[in-house]
Amino acid sequence: MATLSNQGKIDISCWDGTISQHEFHTAASAFAERWNKFNAALPQCSWVARPKSPYLSSTSKDEGYLSVENVIMFPTPAAESCYGGDDKEGEEELSCSRSQEDDFIDGATMLQNHDDASHHYDFHVVYNASYRVPVLYFRAYCSDGRTLVLDDVEKSIPAISAKLLMLSKWTFITQEDHPYLNCPWYTLHPCGTSEWMKMLFSHEPAVDDGGVAVAKYLVSWFSVAGQVFGLKIPFEMLSSIGN
Amino acid sequence: MASEPRKVVVHLRATGDAPILKQAKFKIDGSDKFVKVIDFLRRQLHRDTLFVYVNSAFSPNPEELITDLYNNFGIDGKLVVNYACSMAWG
């Protein structure tokens, strides 16, 4: 795993918003390390390497994807499917926020307690060699293991049902074959990613020493992609990356 | 910890080809959520979808408190919020 040092810089003065496979690996290591350190409220993030194939002469050690699985979310009252219990709880404590804050009412429906009405999400971050950007793959299922179709997902995630911010203009949900697992997952289509990544970094002040750390790329990327699902990342994940 | 009602100066900055607001500087309660800034921008620009971000290459979740954003991303006594309206599909 890469250390927290600044391995690799992006020169944003002439950058198209994309990264190489190797840079993705560097950024992924940094992301996973920080996620696990600062994001105690959510399941751990791990790197899953591409299994060695007997048919390939060599497998790049950079190949693999990030995985955060079994993120539990409660559907909003508008959702059907496995909604059955009483989830009208108004106040939830989020331990991933600043620890000094009091009880925090959060519109994102992320909770710790389980019951039958919960939805479970698996998120994978996979590098796309054509667009040269990360892609968020996800699948959703009920507590009993039943897969949720996109309609259920759209109804149960407020940001998706309201088409806030990201969706319909900057990305859209599509179904693709997971390149490692070879079965259909939902994804946020990557066609606009390089553009908004370029925009995100365009006002990045830390450019005096030759560029922005590659290690920051996925943290910034996830601040946008994760927002589609109401996922937040703690500020510490950003500020811990020295420049 | 009691949160005192403290106003935060927010400076809205147009990027890309986004329209520049006549009045781009505001004071907003630190206890308000970022969604208030987003909604304001939407109404002013008559757009539903906006790309909104702060320095440090970060797009804040709408549920974040303004005071938290100011504490983490504020510079020179203000919080600069960048916004963009459109982009070319890559």
Image (spheres, helix red, strand yellow):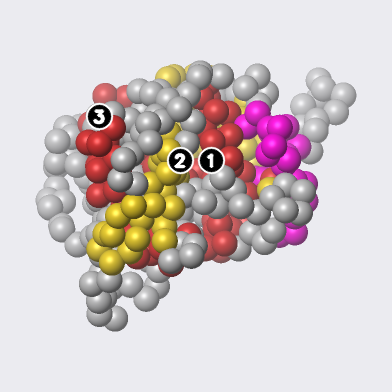
Chain under numbered label 2: A
Circle nearer the N terminus (1, 2): 1
Q: Residue at x 22, y 44 (%)?
A: A117
Judged by depth in the image, the label closer to the viewer, 1 or 2, is 1
Residue drawn 77% across the image and 48% down it? A210
x and y percent of residue A17 in the render? 62, 32
**In the picture provided, is A25 more to the left or to the right than B89?**
right
* Amino acid at dot 2: Val
- Residue at mark 3: B46
Nearer-the-camera pick, B15 or A70? B15
Could you say which quadrant of the image residue A51 lies in? Answer: top right
In this rendering, the answer to whether A21 lies above or below A221 is above
User: In this figure, which residue is indicated by the disc labeled 2?
Assistant: A224
C-alpha span from label 3 to label 2? 22 Å
The reply to whether callout 1 and callout 2 are in contact (CB within 8 Å) is yes
Of badges 3 and 1, the one in the foreground is 3
Instruction: Tell me if residue A226 is in the magenta stretch.
Output: no
Location of residue A94 with respect to A46 vertically, above or below: below
Label 2 element class: helix
Which stretch is magenta?
A1-28
CA distance separating discs 1 and 2: 9 Å
Is A9 within the magenta? Answer: yes
Badge 2: how crowded within 10 Å, few (<14), some, or many (20+)? many
Looking at the rendered structure, which numbered label has been put on residue A200?
Answer: 1
Q: Residue at x 30, y 55 (%)?
A: B26
Q: Residue at the front extreme?
A: B22
Residue at the image point whose x is 42% and y is 20% from the top: A174
Q: Quadrant of residue B49?
A: top left
Amino acid residing under circle 1: Leu
